[in-house]
Amino acid sequence: MAESAAPSAAGALPSDAELLGHLERAVDEVFATMIGTCERRARVDGGELIERSNGAELELLLDGGALLRVDREAVVEFRGALDGRVAIRANAACATAIARGLLMSEEEESLALEDVNDALKECANMLTGWLKSKALDPLGAFSMSVPFIKDAPRELVGAPAGTLVYSTRGGEFAIELWRRPPSQNQLVESR
């Protein structure tokens, strides 16, 4: 069940819905400016999208039975009064389109996998930085991990706070927010 989007009391931890709202604004004001038009397709408050493995790709089941296929995930973790992670998940074509937008490269220009991954990591970093500055820093000191590409099977990182799914010229991508009580956290180092 989604939590209220009303602002939390001073000093209180923001609700999942508030945190997801901050990520939506980050996409609208920062992310979309850097990579081009992003249209939100879905918002899943609480819980996570249903996943199923399809070889090297992971399929996320969206409302209405549509599938979002992803094969890479850029992650930034945060730690403080509230711990968690922001992840961007996309398939190769969408990740490449995001990288082209961020790097302002032409369609015919070849991009190395390292450039695509670096661009995806930078996007995850921008989104997490926005979340940190707008929602988390007012609660006290927070730190962020170095962005990393997660290409191994996912381990549980607390409770899923929600997922945003967007369409862009290269396809669809998901932005996920996970949170957990600070006592359960070890900040992940760069991989």
Image (tube, grey):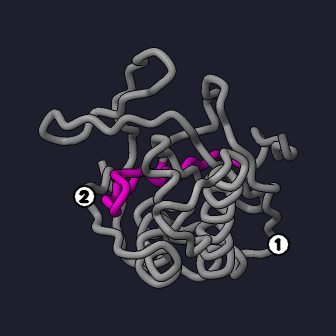
Image position, residue 86 (x, y; %):
59, 54
Numbered mark located on residue 41 in the image: 2
Image position, residue 96 (x, y; %):
52, 53
Q: Disc count in the image?
A: 2
Q: What residue type is labelled 2?
A: Arg
Numbered mark located on residue 141 in the image: 1
Image position, residue 175 (x, y; %):
47, 54
Q: Which residue is drawn at 37% across and 56% down?
A: 170
Q: How far apart are marks 2 and 1 (CA)?
A: 33 Å
* Image position of 29 (left or right of 50): right
Residue positioned most to the right: 189
Question: In the rendered structure, does residue 190 fall within the stretch colored magenta?
Answer: no
Magenta span:
161-181
Q: Residue at x 30, y 56 (%)?
A: 43
Q: Which amino acid does label 1 sit on?
A: Ala
Disc 1, SS: loop
Question: In the rendered structure, does residue 168 fall within the stretch colored magenta?
Answer: yes
Asked whether the residues under the numbered discs 2 and 1 touch, taking CB atoms below 8 Å apart as contact, a structural biologist would say: no
Q: Closest to the observer: 162 or 71?
A: 71
* Image position of 179 (left or right of 172): right
Q: Which of marks 2 and 1 is in front?
A: 2
